[in-house]
Image (cartoon, rainbow, N blue to C red):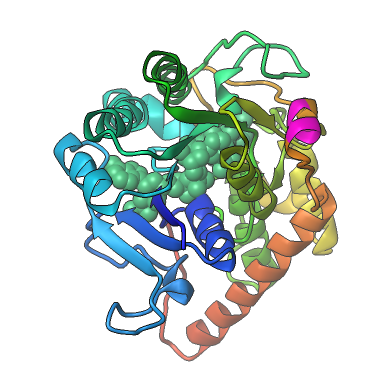
């Protein structure tokens, strides 16, 4: 049985990857942060108490800002594969917390690479690199496109990307950068734009809310489905030699187009419900991302399976179920109208 160590296992990608690896009979170890409320919603369905003979998911408390612990985990677990997905991953928030983002998203990667080097364990390493590194570079972006990062998050990811390359060259680590373009799902965090749209639009449909506040509607993104993208991560680590790969659909759509599609599918008029709030604009924006994943297609045999429209349908369907439950609970007086802090 292969062993995998996943940082960021409680996040969107971590949960889909854990599912995929369990299906391939891996033993899974995940790094989780202590939180004052439960933060394991996305993986609760995979977890079995460690007394259960069928338990194959083990969680370890830790933090990417603490290097000694990461070294201990590497040494004690000796994973065959490490998927490093943990990060402060919100671009807008990275402008509010640039130092923290540099520490967790940038140095966090170095801390794991150092843990591998110092312990000398034989493992394969996946780095969650990002299309945000391309920033202002014109489309179509591929592995040869020079980076032009436009946020503290993107700069931190560029640092991590080059550290991975350096450790691969200097210490012969089997380390890969997956340069993933935006990928979404019903498990996407609610402050990322696609989920914010489907979540609020379905609440509007159920009469729970009336308004959706957004920032820049003209930005364009290459949006894929997270379930498809974690398959690419795994494939990279099964190759004979380590390399870097762009993972994308090759299509680009504006935030406005996403809004219009969602509201039309729900038979709602977006002009009546969608408003612009300057708080959601970024000091520097990435105007357009559109990836060229030819290398991954040819070498890994990877291609996206879920289309843009299917992704939207999937997210609307899941959020409609949540909104219906919320409505029932509200009518029974169990919850009040749900307001969230902005991000
Ligand atoms: P996500 O949902 O925001 O998950 C981030 C994960 O990192 C969570 O499990 C979070 O734990 C954990 N984390 C944050 N700070 C940490 C710290 N200090 N110590 C330990 N763990 C910490 O992100 P995602 O969408 O799954 O993305 C996974 C990775 O891919 C990230 O590195 C992201 O930057 C990168 N990426 C994402 C996309 C995308 O479109 N989704 C595209 C390219 C690259 P909590 O649950 O406790 O917050
Ligand atoms: O923004 C615009 C916003 O926050 C997409 C992360 O997973 O993908 C993600 O980063 C676009 C931007 O994702 C709102 O200005 C308009 O142009 O969903 P997002 P992101 O910034 O592209 C990359 C690849 C990652 O690596 C990151 O970890 O939508 N936008 N109005 C808005 N965005 C948000 N969040 N909220 C709004 O109200």
Q: Is residue 260 visible?
A: yes
Instruction: Name above or below for residue 138 compared with residue 66.
Output: above
State whether residue 145 is above or below residue 224.
Answer: above
In percent of the image, x 67 and y 65: which residue is there?
A: 202
The percent coordinates of residue 78 (x first, y second) are: 31, 49
* Residue 253: image location, x then y, percent: 79, 35
- Residue at 31% x, 29% y is 97
Q: Nearer the viewer, residue 197 or 60?
A: 60
Q: Which residues are magenta?
A: 295-299
Task: Tell me if I can see residue 341 in this picture.
Answer: no
* Residue 192 point in image, percent of width and height: 55, 45
Q: Quadrant of residue 249?
A: top right
Of 108 and 193, nearer the camera is 108
Q: Name the chief secondary structure element in magenta.
A: helix
Q: Is residue 302 magenta?
A: no
Q: Residue furthest bottom?
A: 332
Q: Residue at the location (48% across, 22% down)?
A: 154
Q: Is residue 97 above or below residue 310?
A: above
The answer to whether residue 284 is above or below residue 332 is above
Q: Quadrant of ligand 2?
A: top right
Picture coordinates of residue 186, whole percent (x, y): 62, 61
Q: Residue at x 81, y 57 (%)?
A: 310
């Amino acid at each position: 049985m292969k062993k995998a160590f996943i940082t960021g296992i409680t996040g969107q990608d971590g949960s889909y990857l854990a599912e995929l690896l369990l299906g391939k009979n891996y033993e899974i170890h995940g790094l989780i942060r202590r939180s004052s409320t439960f933060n394991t919603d996305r993986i609760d369905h995979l977890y079995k108490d460690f007394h259960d003979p069928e338990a194959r998911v083990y969680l370890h408390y830790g933090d990417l800002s603490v290097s000694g612990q990461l070294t201990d985990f590497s040494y004690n677990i000796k994973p065959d594969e490490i998927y490093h997905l943990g990060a402060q991953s919100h671009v807008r928030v990275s402008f509010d917390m640039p130092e923290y983002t540099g520490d967790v998203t940038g140095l966090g990667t170095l801390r794991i690479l150092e843990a591998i080097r110092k312990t000398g364990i034989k493992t394969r390493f996946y780095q969650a690199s990002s299309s945000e590194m391309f920033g202002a570079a014109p489309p179509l972006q591929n592995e040869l496109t020079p980076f032009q990062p436009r946020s503290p998050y993107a700069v931190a990811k560029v640092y991590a990307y080059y550290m991975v390359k350096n450790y691969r060259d200097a210490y012969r680590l089997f380390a890969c950068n997956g340069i993933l373009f935006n990928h979404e799902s019903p498990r996407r965090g609610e402050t990322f734009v696609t989920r914010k749209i489907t979540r609020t639009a379905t609440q509007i449909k159920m009469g729970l809310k009336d308004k959706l506040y957004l920032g820049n509607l003209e930005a364009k993104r290459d949006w894929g489905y997270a379930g498809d993208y974690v398959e690419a991560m795994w494939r990279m680590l099964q190759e004979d030699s380590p390399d870097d790969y762009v993972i994308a659909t090759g299509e680009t759509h504006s935030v406005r187009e996403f809004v219009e599609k969602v509201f039309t599918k729900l038979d709602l008029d977006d002009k009546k419900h969608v408003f612009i709030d300057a708080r959601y604009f970024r000091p520097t924006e990435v105007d357009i991302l559109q990836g060229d994943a030819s290398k991954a297609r040819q070498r890994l045999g990877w291609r996206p399976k879920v289309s843009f429209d299917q992704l939207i349908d999937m997210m609307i369907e899941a959020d409609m179920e949540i909104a219906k439950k919320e409505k029932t609970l509200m009518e029974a007086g169990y919850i009040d109208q749900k307001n969230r802090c902005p991000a």
